[in-house]
Image (cartoon, grey):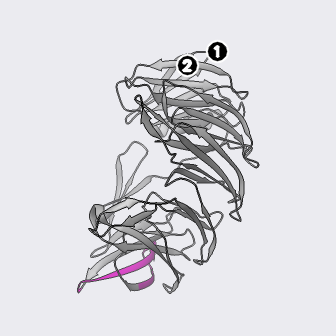
Amino acid sequence: MGKKLELFREFYDFEELEDYKASLRSKERRIKSSQVEILGENLVFRDLNGKIIETRGFDEYQPIQISENRDYILLQKYEDEKIIVELRNFKEDRIWKKQMGGFYYAYISNDGNCSVFFKGYGSGRSRVVNEAEFYDKNGERLNRFSFEGGVSSDHQVFSNKSQLLIIWTIPIKILEDGSRELSGTACIYAFDFTGKEIWDFPIKEQGIHDLKISNDGKKIIAVGEGEGEVISGKLQGVGRIYFIDEQGKLVNEMPFNYGCTRAGIKFSDDTEHTVVFADQNVFLFEEDTGKLLWEYVDPNIFFEFIDISSKSKDVVVGGYDEQMNFYIIMISQDGGKIIDEKIEIPEEIEKVEISDNGDKIFLELSNKVIVFNVT
């Protein structure tokens, strides 16, 4: 160690914060547009401080999904006990209209040429989503795919840049009494935007805690949920980190000790390194090969946040001990711990970031961001 955190500034205006971050990078700020969310029958636009700046309704239609670039929107309405779905652009010109069977959630690509609807059976907590239907720019169905196991709305990564949809399943067995149990292992599926399955990749665990695709779509990293059990109050067992190429071939697989209940993955902006946390473990890998460069284990802290600086390659992680005290730990590019500080904050932390040069750490709360200098 040898460095410490020094309180620099607190931001209560998130617009001002983004301007400040851009000034550190000497480039145009990354976030310019407002945030948008579906709230009941409306689209609600908010600035970065959460203030509503526009509310848009669609008469009898309800918004269900917007494209990442906000150029297209999927809407639905109920008519004579039937579900009618429309795809519109943001000028509200209708692209297509179609009667659709029941579905649970949907996605739409940035070019409007691919819409995916996830279907299944059951309702509420007993529902099983195990089908995906792909539609083209005219609303014609391209493909229907059924999965062995269940899929949730958190189990997809929709990559517009690489024209990929990655889906992973939880193996679910339906018993005679209608109850469910986990059985077997999970699987990762990759589709292009025509609905064609490109590859599938079974993993050794029953689920995945995090999965990310690199910007170029050539690297997929997944963290298996582990096979842990509680022994003497500690979760112990084995988890695995998988490095998969764009053809679904295994590049590297690394097991790690402890069962896994929470994990996160972050690619560095220079595309050379990837950092992963899994419970009490932190790893730095070469992005292309999946080669492990270093591993850090803290037996007292369960991590929840991770980031890596693009220039200094320093890594920052944040997490809680068993007494729910929050700690920030900073690790150098060679794996040495350089900061380990308890942060006295009663509020819930939402995000931890490190600046490009590794000289500032941002701690985001619900209503403010605290900036620390690394000295």
The image position of residue 235, as x and y in percent, is 45, 35
Identify whether 83 is placed above or below 30: below
Say the numbered circle drawn on residue 340: 2
Residue 48 painted magenta: no
Q: Nearer the viewer, residue 86 or 89?
A: 86
Question: Do residues under tags 1 and 2 come within 8 Å of each other at their CB atoms?
Answer: yes
Residue 324 against residue 223 in the figure, above or below: above
Helix, strand or loop status at disc 1: loop
Q: Quadrant of residue 125?
A: bottom left
Amino acid type at mark 1: Met
Q: Residue at x 53, y 32 (%)?
A: 280
Amino acid bearing label 2 = Asp
Residue plotted at (58% across, 57% down): 203
Q: Is residue 82 magenta?
A: yes
55 sits left or right of 150 in the view: left
Of the two numbered discs 1 and 2 on the same chain, state the one appearing first in sequence: 1
Look at the magenta stretch and give its main secondary structure: strand
Neighbour tally class for label 1: few under 14, some 14-19, many 20 plus, Cα within 10 Å: few
The picture quadrant where one finds residue 22 is top right
The spot of residue 142 in percent (x, y) is: 54, 84
Residues rendered magenta in the picture: 80-97
**Regarding mark 2 in the picture, which secondary structure is present there?**
strand
Quadrant that contains the C terminus: top right
Most extreme residue toward the left, as rendered? 80
